[in-house]
Amino acid sequence: MEVRWDIVVVGAGSAGIAAVEGAHQQEPAARILLLSEEPQAPYDRTCLSKHIASGFQPDRFKLREDQWFQHNNVTFRGGEAVAALDPRKRGLRLAGGDTVKYQSLVLATGAVPVYPRIVRPHQEGSFFVLRTLSDAQRLIKGLSSARTVLIDGMGVLALEIANQLVQMKKKPTLVGATAQLMPRQLNTRAGEILEEVLVRNKVKLMFQDEILSFESNRKGGLDVALLRSSGVYDAVVVCIGVQPCTELAEAAGLHVERGVVVDEHLRSSDPSIYAAGEVAQHPDGSISHVWHAAEYQGRIAGSNAAGAQQVYDRRPFRLTTNVFDTHVLSMNLPRDPQGYRVEEVEADTVYQGFYFAEDRLHGVVVLNDESRSTLYSEAVIDQWSIDRVAEQLML
Ligand SMILES: Cc1cc2nc3c(=O)[nH]c(=O)nc-3n(C[C@H](O)[C@H](O)[C@H](O)COP(=O)(O)OP(=O)(O)OC[C@H]3O[C@@H](n4cnc5c(N)ncnc54)[C@H](O)[C@@H]3O)c2cc1C
């Protein structure tokens, strides 16, 4: 059966849902098809790592209520992976055999976990990743009989999982090639403070180390060989990063580098195809890996697919998390602090790291000042002067 739609959105994550809403806001009302390889109603992926201990109840984390689909004039087909894209015919072939035609297409296919060199996805039986609801269900089941868990990674996902494991009375160990926790989002001092918090919570940390191999032993555990040591663990969780899901676009001959290359309107090398979220690579080469950026891009891509001409103005990177009762805010931290004026303040449990470029606020790293998160964000977006920061933000 073949049906022609005004707009087809592939992927029902943060970017895909926002693309539907962006398209729906344009006139005339478009007929929209939303396709998702995952069978469930769209859910909030970011909650997966924060609710392992409570057994993640999908209904609590639905992205939109049931009436949203009708309200946005969208037909949702879950459990429908798109197998092939033919830009010349403006057509899609679904894994189930149906074909679908579109006027405009939004690719919001997100990203998949990166696997360490030593393992392949088909060996997944012996370790865990966390990206989808089914990954979470498998992990929760696998953890029921586990006590010692090795987490491959030092990033925010690794920390959130470790936090959950401690709540479940498990013994997590984090291993990573880096010299500090969350190296992309934290500076040295904030990393040290968080490290102290984790150690206090009995999380073992193995910096500048690497898993070389692991294999199941007769007792049902895993013998793990690391660069500097070896150990036996009940489970291994891999969270060393993600890579954009570009297969469809690549096979269809779109311009793909690390992600699907888009212009400032989020249009790909084919003028009727847009890309948003973690699959999209922007003109400066960047790919966003945070929820709010995927949502913002999705809305623009959807609007443009429906005829608008909106421009994606890149917003400062912003990440917040709450791990081991420590609130973390990281916004626009420069990769190389050289050339920035850095002001650090510590008062009681609060840490503030301010990065100024030409006396204007460029980025912040803040621990334990959650109630003023919005103010910090405003200050970075509006590039407050040093004097204003000193007066209104510094402790
Ligand atoms: C456990 C976890 C916790 C996170 N926590 C945070 C956080 O606290 N804060 C934050 O900012 N970010 C967080 N992130 C990152 C954030 O979730 C992502 O940046 C965001 O979800 C990206 O949205 P997206 O729509 O681009 O992709 P996704 O949410 O990955 O959605 C893409 C969808 O497309 C589907 N798809 C792929 N290929 C096909 C196909 N061929 N056919 C049909 N469907 C397809 C996928 O199955 C998926 O459902 C977290 C991520 C994870 C995994």
Image (cartoon, grey):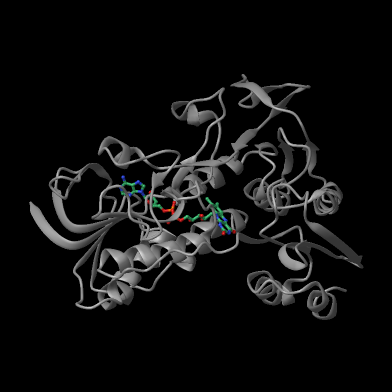
Residue at 84%, 46% in the rendered image: 199
Left or right: residue 320 versus residue 30 is: right
Q: Tell me the quarter of the picture where residue 64 sits.
A: bottom left
Residue 289 seen from this side: yes
Which residue is at a point 23% across and 73% down the rendered structure image?
73
Q: Which residue is more in the foreground, 292 or 95?
A: 292
Q: Position of residue 9 (x, y in %)?
A: 29, 58
- The image quadrant of residue 152 is top right
Spot the residue most to the front: 358
Q: Residue 278: x percent and y percent?
A: 46, 51
Q: Nearer the viewer, residue 344 or 65?
A: 344
Visible residue check, residue 326: no
Q: Nearer the viewer, residue 253 or 48?
A: 253
Left or right, residue 322 beside residue 297: right
Which image quarter holds the C terminus?
bottom right
How many numbered dots are placed on residues in this image? 0
Establish if 182 lies above or below 70. Answer: above
Identify which residue is drawn at 78% across, 67% down.
359
Image height check: is 327 above or below 159?
below
Instruction: Choose top left, top right, bottom left or bottom right for residue 77.
Output: bottom left
Task: Pinpoint residue 7: horizontal percent, then vertical percent.
Answer: 22, 62
Residue at coordinates 52% horizontally, 60% vertically from top-left? 291
Q: Is residue 390 left or right of residue 144?
A: right
Residue 65 percent location from the top left of the image: 38, 74
Residue sitting farthest toward the left: 1
**Looking at this view, is 106 or 202 the one in front?**
106
